Structure formats: structure tokens, C-alpha cells
């Protein structure tokens, strides 16, 4: 596929860490719903929010208000648990991205073991799809994980870009090639390919340039930049960096 003929590369903005800042002190500010509305004004194509088991950032009330307040597609990141499945089915977000979740981690670390958790994931994927929710699996760029996602019937895979984002020296090219091969393999399986984790103004270009990638989900970096420049300008600059890659 010619990159210039690729449809618009979507940008999903993750607003979790607006809630992290709020929760550090308590109270109502800053409000992640306001951040979502500002992101929409700045050109985001979707909003991502992770409702974690321990509610360390996004809360149930945040999710209620997001569903009722935003016009952009909402992508709910969730663990593969009965509780989160029930919440997703009750709220009917546009999309649900199943991610690994461990209470001790600071953020999502590593990809979902779609291959090793088939029996756990299969009924969850099936019920989300039956409810009209687009299902994605957040996985490492490994062929057997993509194959497993296809067998599970998940229409979308989000590639974990953390190792690439944190790589130095020769490892940058190594990790980028892993992602490229995985993206090609996923498209060959009929999967829609997304990517995210650790992307910045400086490293987003090579990922955005991959014609197989349909969507990037970026959060922590944008919220951090917003402290200095404002959320709107940070998103606009990221959008420009993505567009320049084509």
C-alpha cells in the first residue's frame, strides 16, 4: 500500500493521567472529561480511558460522564475480568481494548498473552462483539500473539510500542523492524492494526509512516506536554508530526 493513499491515520488521546493528577490530591480538578472535550476541539479522532481494577485514575463516575458528554468514539481499556465486561456491556463504548493488568504495575507493562489466555478471552471477546463493541487486544509485536488474536475473532490489534519507544542506539531499528513485520503480518490476517505506548513527538514519525497502522493511541506524553504548552497545542503538534510522516 502506498502510504500517500492510506486513509486518515487516527489519533486516540488517552486522558487517564488527567485523572491521575486529580486523584493525587482529591477533589474535582483537573477534570478528565474537560480534557476529552479539549482533545476533540484540538483534532483528536477518539478518546481512550482505562478503568483499572483499583480505580487509580479513571473512575466509574468519569466513565459515566464521558459516555454522556463526548461525541468522539470512546475506547475503553479494560482487563479481562467479569467486572470490566459487565461495565463495558452496560456503557457500550465504541471500542474496548483488552489489556493486561497487574495491581503492582505503574502502567500497563508488556502485552496481553492472547495465545496463553485463549479460554479466558474467547467468551469476553464474543460478548463484546455481540454487543456491537469493537474489540482490540493490546499485544507485543509477536507473530503467535497476532495469530491468537485472529483465532479469537478480535478485529483489531494494538501493537505495544514501549520497547521501541524506550530503545537506544541500534535497538531502535531492531524494535522498529519488529513492529513493521508484525503490522504486515496482522494486516495479512485481516486485522486492523493500531499502535501505542510511550510515543512522543520525536519517535512517532516512523510508526505513523507504516501504511498498515490505522490508529495511534497516545496519552501520558501528551498530558505531560500539556503542563507546559496546553493540551490543545500538544495534540496539534502530535497531529502535525503524524501527518508529516506520510
Image: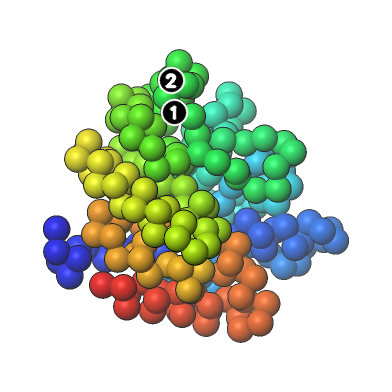
Q: Could you tell me how far apart the alpha carbons at marks 2 and 1 are, in whole angstroms?
A: 6 Å
Residue pointed to by mark 1:
114
Confirm or deny contact between disc 2 and disc 1 (CB under 8 A). Answer: yes
Viewport quadrant of the C terminus: bottom left
- The numbered disc on residue 43 is none
Q: Residue placed at 30% from the left, 24% from the top?
A: 151
Residue 171: x and y in percent read 46, 56
Viewport quadrant of the N terminus: bottom left
Q: Few, some or many C-alpha atoms within 10 Å of disc 1 (few <14, some 14-19, many ≥20)?
A: many
Q: Residue placed at 72% from the left, 67% from the top?
A: 30
In the image, 222 versus 92, the foreground residue is: 222
Residue pointed to by mark 2:
118
Q: Residue placed at 61% from the left, 83% from the top?
A: 229
* Residue found at the very far front of the displayed protein: 170
* Residue found at the very far top of the displayed protein: 119
Query: Is 182 left, or right, of 29 in this rendering?
Result: left
**SS at mark 2?**
helix
From the viewer's perspective, is residue 48 above or below residue 153?
below
Residue 216, quarter of the rendered image: bottom left
Residue 180 visible? yes
Q: Few, some or many C-alpha atoms within 10 Å of disc 2 (few <14, some 14-19, many ≥20)?
A: some
Residue 173: x and y in percent read 39, 59
Query: Is 151 left, or right, of 60 in this rendering?
Result: left
**SS at mark 1?**
loop
From the viewer's perspective, is residue 169 above or below residue 127?
below
Q: Residue placed at 47% from the left, 47% from the top?
A: 160
Query: Is 167 left, or right, of 154 in this rendering?
Result: right
Residue 48 visible? no
Residue 213: x and y in percent read 30, 55
In the image, 153 versus 201, the foreground residue is: 201
Residue 65, quarter of the rendered image: bottom right
Amino acid at each position: 500500500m502506498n502510504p500517500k493513499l492510506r486513509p486518515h491515520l487516527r489519533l486516540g488521546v488517552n486522558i487517564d493521567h488527567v485523572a491521575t493528577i486529580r486523584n493525587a490530591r482529591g477533589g474535582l480538578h483537573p477534570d478528565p472529561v474537560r480534557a476529552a472535550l479539549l482533545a476533540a476541539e484540538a483534532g483528536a479522532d477518539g478518546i481512550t480511558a482505562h478503568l483499572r481494577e483499583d480505580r487509580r485514575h479513571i473512575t466509574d463516575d468519569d466513565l459515566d460522564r464521558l459516555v454522556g458528554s463526548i461525541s468522539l468514539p470512546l475506547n475503553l481499556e479494560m482487563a479481562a475480568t467479569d467486572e470490566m465486561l459487565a461495565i463495558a456491556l452496560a456503557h457500550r463504548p465504541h471500542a474496548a481494548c483488552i489489556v493486561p493488568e497487574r495491581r503492582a504495575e505503574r502502567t500497563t507493562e508488556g502485552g496481553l498473552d492472547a495465545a496463553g489466555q485463549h479460554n479466558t478471552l474467547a467468551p469476553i471477546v464474543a460478548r463484546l462483539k455481540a454487543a456491537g463493541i469493537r474489540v482490540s487486544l493490546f499485544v507485543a509485536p509477536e507473530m503467535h500473539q497476532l495469530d491468537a488474536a485472529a483465532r479469537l475473532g478480535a478485529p483489531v490489534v494494538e501493537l505495544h510500542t514501549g520497547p521501541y519507544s524506550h530503545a537506544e542506539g541500534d535497538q531502535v531499528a531492531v524494535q522498529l523492524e519488529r513492529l513493521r513485520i508484525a503490522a504486515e503480518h496482522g494486516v495479512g490476517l485481516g486485522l486492523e492494526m493500531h499502535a501505542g505506548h510511550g510515543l512522543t513527538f520525536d519517535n512517532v514519525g516512523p510508526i505513523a509512516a507504516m501504511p498498515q497502522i490505522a490508529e495511534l493511541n497516545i496519552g501520558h506524553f501528551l498530558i505531560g506536554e500539556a503542563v507546559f504548552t496546553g493540551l490543545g497545542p500538544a495534540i496539534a503538534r502530535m497531529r502535525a508530526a503524524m501527518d508529516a510522516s506520510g
